[in-house]
Image: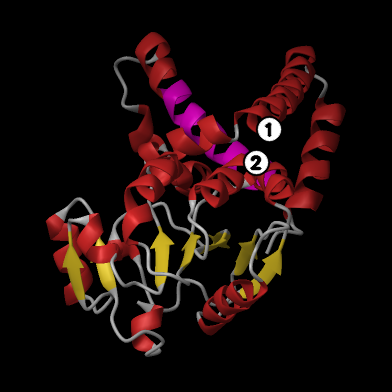
């Protein structure tokens, strides 16, 4: 949508599975036209943006290899990098350049209708170059995201997965788990009451990201499992600690823990 609005491309072709979503993309001015055949959409393209669940990357790149335009740039918007970046680089033929990218500006809603021209403004976008990343391609992708209004950073792909595992992947898993816990609590303890109808803004804020795409987050968990399991261990330890303080009725210690969390939370912007 930004590329089209800023006239940064002569033609933008949307490739997807759901025709209705693609038609909506045309209506919203995000793309010029659409196809459901990858071969037709990829042939002759100077820039290909992967915006699918990360587990599909390797399959798609294998399918596209024969039709990639010499000198083309492939980039993505996925939440996992690490080993995935290395595998995509290995799959691409000589002369095709890959630049990993992750805009930190998603919403819990999915589909093109959830997009907007301002989505990436004042947001961070992390590029994850490797030792083999083409410098010119890296600069072009940086310029693209800066045009969208993002603050662009670079980071090692594996460091990216450790950082985002902590501040994004862990909170999403916790939100999914919290909703499922409430479902079990209702089933076992309060079957006569629909608990969620009594949840206010606090519950909505805490669990908002549990409305995100299960398909997308399934793949993120699988591809970043080592980091995520380690961080879930740390989270479980903190929950056990708070549980013990509550069990002991240790009000002063509970307050200190909450005050410590409140101080850190206030640093978030």
Residue 37 falls in which quadrant of the image?
bottom left
Foreground residue among 102 and 107: 102
**Residue at the farthest top position:** 188
* Residue at (48, 55) in percent of width and height: 93
User: Gap between marks 2 and 1, in whole Å?
Assistant: 6 Å
Relative placement, left or right, of 159 versus 214 is: right
The mark nearer the N terminus, 2 or 1, is 2
* Residue at (52, 30) in percent of width and height: 222
Q: Which residue is identified by label 2?
A: 165
Q: Which residue is identified by label 1?
A: 227
The spot of residue 192 in percent (x, y) is 29, 16
* Residue at (14, 66) in percent of width and height: 23
* Residue at (65, 41) in percent of width and height: 165
Q: Which residues are magenta?
A: 165-182
The magenta stretch spans residue 211:
no
Q: Residues within 10 Å of mark 1 (few under 14, many from 20)?
A: some
Q: Residues within 10 Å of mark 2 (few under 14, many from 20)?
A: many
| Badge 2 vs badge 1, beta-carbon distance below 8 Å | yes
Relative placement, left or right, of 164 versus 211 is: right
Asked if residue 109 shows in the view, the reply is no
Relative placement, left or right, of 74 versus 246 is: left
95, above or below 122, in the image: above
Foreground residue among 209 and 42: 42
Residue 49 falls in which quadrant of the image?
bottom left
Q: Quadrant of the C terminus?
A: bottom right
């Amino acid at each position: 949508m930004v590329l089209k609005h800023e006239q940064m491309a002569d033609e933008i072709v949307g490739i997807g599975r759901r025709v209705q979503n693609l038609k909506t993309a045309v209506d919203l001015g995000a793309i010029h036209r659409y196809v459901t055949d990858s071969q037709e959409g990829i042939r002759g393209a100077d820039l290909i943006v992967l915006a699918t669940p990360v587990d599909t990357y390797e399959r798609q790149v294998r399918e596209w290899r024969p039709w990639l335009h010499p000198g083309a740039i492939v980039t993505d918007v996925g939440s996992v990098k690490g080993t995935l970046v290395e595998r995509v680089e290995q799959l691409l033929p000589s002369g095709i350049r890959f630049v990993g990218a992750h805009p930190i500006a998603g919403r819990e809603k999915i589909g093109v209708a959830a997009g907007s021209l301002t989505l990436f403004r004042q947001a961070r976008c992390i590029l994850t170059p490797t030792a083999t990343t083409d410098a010119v391609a890296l600069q072009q992708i940086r310029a693209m995201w800066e045009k969208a209004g993002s603050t662009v950073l670079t980071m090692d792909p594996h460091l990216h997965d450790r950082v985002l595992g902590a501040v994004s992947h862990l909170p999403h898993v916790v939100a999914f788990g919290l909703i499922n816990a409430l479902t079990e609590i209702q089933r076992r303890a309060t079957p006569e009451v629909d608990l969620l109808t009594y949840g206010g803004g606090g519950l909505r804020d805490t669990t908002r990201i549990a409305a995100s795409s299960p398909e997308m987050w399934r793949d993120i968990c699988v591809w970043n499992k080592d980091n995520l399991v380690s961080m879930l261990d740390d989270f479980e330890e903190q929950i056990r600690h708070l549980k013990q303080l509550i069990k002991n009725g240790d009000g002063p210690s509970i307050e200190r823990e909450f005050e410590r969390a409140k101080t850190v939370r206030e640093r978030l912007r």
